[in-house]
């Protein structure tokens, strides 16, 4: 049986997929909401299921939120997000 943290992570992924299918004007505000809710979920998954499963969930979340991660990395490099 799945742990409650993995169920929460799966629900997060379903919500993220639904948001991706929605209008583009909601993508960035929804991305912030997904980040705010996703970080504690990754911590919870890591706590309940171990670091390997936590890394897999983190990789899945990063693949869903690839544009915010891309812009963050560009800003950290000083490229201005381009």
Image (cartoon, rainbow, N blue to C red):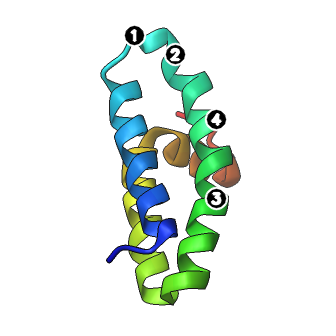
* Extreme-front residue of the structure: 1
Query: How far, Cα to Cα, is label 4 from label 2?
Result: 10 Å
Mark 2–mark 1 CB contact (< 8 Å): yes
- Find disc 4 in the rendering and name its residue: 32
- Give coordinates of residue 79: x percent, y percent: 62, 42
Which comes before the other along the chain, label 4 or label 1? Answer: 1
Name above or below for residue 9 compared with residue 72: below
- Give coordinates of residue 60: x percent, y percent: 37, 60
- Find disc 2 in the rendering and name its residue: 26
Which comes before the other along the chain, label 4 or label 2? Answer: 2
Residue 81 seen in this snapshot: no
> Helix, strand or loop at disc 4?
helix
Which comes before the other along the chain, label 3 or label 2? Answer: 2
Mark 4–mark 2 CB contact (< 8 Å): no
Query: How far, Cα to Cα, is label 2 from label 1?
Result: 6 Å
> Helix, strand or loop at disc 1?
loop
- Give coordinates of residue 17: x percent, y percent: 33, 35
The residue at 46%/47% (across/down) is 12
């Amino acid at each position: 049986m799945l742990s409650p943290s993995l169920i929460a992570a799966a629900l997060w992924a379903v919500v993220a997929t639904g948001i991706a299918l929605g209008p583009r004007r909601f993508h960035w505000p929804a991305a912030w909401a997904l980040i705010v809710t996703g970080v504690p979920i990754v911590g919870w998954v890591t706590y309940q299921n171990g670091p390997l499963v936590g890394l897999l969930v983190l990789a899945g979340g990063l693949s869903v939120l690839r544009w915010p991660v891309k812009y963050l990395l560009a800003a950290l490099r000083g490229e201005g997000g381009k």
